[in-house]
Amino acid sequence: MARLEDYGFLEKTHTSSGRVPSESGYRYYVDNLMKPKDMTGEDMLKLQTIFKNNSLVLSDVIQKSIEIISEITDYTALSLGKKVLDNCLKQVEVVPISDDTLVAIIITDTGYVENKNIVIKEKILLSEVKKVVDVINKLLVGIPISEIIENLEFKVKPVISEYVEKHETIYQAFYKVFNEFTGKNNMHQAGRINMLNQPEYNTVDKVKELFGKFDDESVIDSIEEDSSGIKIYIGKESKFNEDTAVIKTHYKLGEEEGTIAIVGPKRMDYERVVSILEYIKQHIERE
């Protein structure tokens, strides 16, 4: 033990405390000693229910995967797709759900799907709304999401003003939908509350600091990973804080790509998390 402490692999967090692995100790273990665990049958079964569900689009697969990861590890799971602004519009659909409410379904070329409620207080025929949708699909499909608002104004609005009754009301509704959509970061989190179960975050200040990092777009963006392998960031390397570790992997399927990351305490079960991420990456890219 003394030798390990001399090497800097063990440390005392308090004068009266016992020795625990240091950041260097965890790094040495991960780089030189760690061997991924075989996944348990229970973990594998939970994930297989997602990958065998052919009705799910990739974005749903990713979302449900991080929910399961969070549940079985008791850590926080994140997914980051390509920014929506990098996508192009593929299709827009509308589905009525009540007399004054519709759901607009926006689909991008990467398979990302977003549902937005449209509430129109005026009495407007569904056929009129669908005329606008037809124009949008005819004129805006293939245009980058970052350019949709501009094209909605200068391409769609002049056309629908010619033959769509109450065109201004419908236009404003779709303008709001696309304006919210273009400002969206394609990021999902699951199990943030799990961090409260970890003794490292046992004070209000530590919890506030950690949750602030989850809400900080620059920190979340730094999680994105260009490499195709599993990457492990420990303590200060994680961009969160010295008590936190991040394990992440990059996935790519056709034009769709992104990052899945697990955030937990520095003492997390590295072997298990690495095995789970490798399993998910393999099955996503096999789809």
Image (cartoon, rainbow, N blue to C red):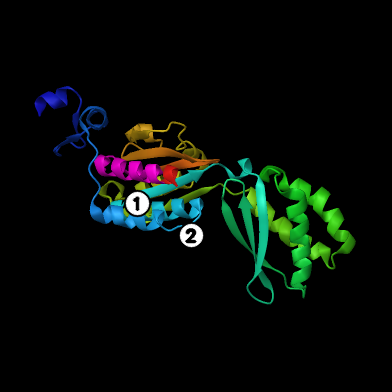
Q: Which residue: 42% across, 44% down? A: 286
Tell me if mark 1 has few (under 14), some (14-19) or many (20+) residues whose alpha carbon lies within 10 angstroms of its own.
Answer: many
In the displayed structure, 266 sits above or below 70; it is above
* Mark 2 vs mark 1, CA separation in Å: 21 Å
Q: Residue at x 19, y 31 (%)?
A: 11
Q: Position of residue 123 (x, y in %)?
A: 77, 75
Tell me residue 147's x, y (percent): 72, 43
Viewer can see residue 201: yes
Provide residue 110's location: percent of width, then percent of height. 58, 45
Residue 55, label in figure: 2
- Tag shown at residue 259: none
Identify the magenta region.
261-283
Q: How many marks?
A: 2
Q: Main secondary structure of the magenta part?
A: helix
Q: Say whether disc 2 or disc 1 marks the residue closer to the N-terminus.
A: 2
- The residue that disc 1 covers is 69
